[in-house]
């Protein structure tokens, strides 16, 4: 689990591919002090596993499922990427719950300055994700925990402070570039509970929990 607070911007040293699989060799420094083989690392918001370690670099494998559902396939040697180690037990929880399981990609529609902030309008690739995207709610963009300023019928808007812009790859992103997005997992759980068994997902649903739309409405959840 991650918090969406990017620790450093790494650089892709090399990439090897075969079909829809990849091995990324990533140069890093800040996260290397206690990184071990088998540790999880968020790479542009994608949870990957460190498979080898070297002096100021590590490698990760990208499997076909991840290749298809993220923008990692667009990376080339020299590409910069946001890096974050898994949250340590007892650490400060500065962002929100981030799993590193991206829901899809999105395209930056516009980048505009608003005094000391930079405002990004972003269009997700699937409209079905909008049920999880709400104003003042949390969203992860390329591994960065951000607050949704507002939504439209086809896009969402986030506002970036100078510190976040300077410490992440968003400073290099322009209109037309793609980003990985992960919606707040809490919304996904609520949606699943509301619709569990409603479309013959299971032959026999367990109703012993008593959780239903009426139950949630009566208790102020919907």
Image (tube, helix red, strand yellow):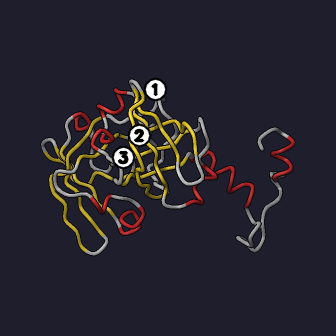
Q: Earlier in the sequence, mark 3 or mark 1?
A: 3
Q: Give the vertical position of 9 relative to 25 (above or below).
A: above
Q: Regarding mark 3 in the picture, which secondary structure is present there?
A: strand
Q: Compute the Cα span from label 3 to label 1.
A: 17 Å
In the rendered image, is residue 17 in sight? yes
Q: Give the vertical position of 187 relative to 138 (above or below).
A: below
Asked whether 115 or 173 is in front, the reply is 115
In the rendered image, residue 194, in percent from the top left (x then y), is placed at 75, 55
Q: Count the marks: how many?
A: 3
Q: Compute the Cα span from label 2 to label 1.
A: 16 Å
Q: Regarding mark 1 in the picture, which secondary structure is present there?
A: loop
Q: Which circle, 2 or 1, is nearer the viewer?
A: 2
Q: Regarding mark 2 in the picture, which secondary structure is present there?
A: strand
Disc number placed over residue 144 in the picture, else none: 2
Q: Earlier in the sequence, mark 3 or mark 2?
A: 3
Query: Which image quarter: residue 196?
Result: bottom right
Query: Does residue 28 appear to the left or right of 5 in the view shown?
Result: left
Asked whether 97 or 181 is in front, the reply is 181
In the rendered image, is residue 40 in sight? no
In the rendered image, residue 99, in percent from the top left (x then y), is placed at 48, 47
Query: Does residue 119 appear to the left or right of 127 in the view shown?
Result: left
What residue do we see at 28% from left, 51% from top? 50
Disc number placed over residue 92 in the picture, else none: 1
Q: Earlier in the sequence, mark 2 or mark 1?
A: 1
What residue do we see at 16% from left, 55% from top? 77
Disc number placed over residue 201 in the picture, else none: none
Query: Does residue 65 appear to the left or right of 43 in the view shown?
Result: right
For disc 3, the neighbor class at 10 Å (few under 14, some 14 to 19, many from 20) is: many
Label 3 sits on residue: 42
- Is there CB contact under 8 Å for labels 3 and 1? no
What residue do we see at 44% from left, 49% from top? 100
């Amino acid at each position: 689990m991650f918090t969406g607070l990017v620790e450093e911007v790494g650089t892709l040293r090399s990439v090897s591919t075969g079909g829809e699989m990849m091995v990324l060799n990533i140069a890093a420094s800040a996260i290397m002090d206690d990184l071990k083989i088998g540790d999880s690392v968020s790479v542009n918001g994608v949870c990957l596993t460190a498979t080898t370690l070297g002096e100021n670099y590590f490698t990760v494998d990208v499997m076909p499922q991840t290749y298809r559902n993220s923008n990692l396939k667009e990376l080339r040697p020299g590409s910069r990427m946001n890096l974050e180690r898994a949250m340590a037990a007892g650490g400060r929880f500065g962002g929100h719950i981030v799993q590193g399981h991206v829901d899809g990609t999105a395209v930056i529609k516009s980048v505009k300055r608003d005094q000391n902030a930079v405002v990004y309008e972003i269009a997700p690739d699937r409209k079905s994700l909008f049920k999880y995207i709400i104003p003042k709610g949390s969203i992860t963009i390329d591994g960065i925990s951000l607050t949704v300023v507002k939504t439209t019928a086809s896009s969402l808007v986030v506002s970036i402070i100078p510190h976040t812009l300077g410490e992440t790859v968003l400073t290099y992103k322009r209109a037309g570039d793609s980003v990985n997005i992960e919606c707040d997992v809490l919304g996904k759980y609520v949606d699943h509970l509301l619709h569990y068994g409603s479309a013959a997902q299971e032959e026999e649903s367990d109703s012993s929990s008593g959780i239903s739309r009426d139950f949630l409405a009566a208790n102020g959840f919907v």
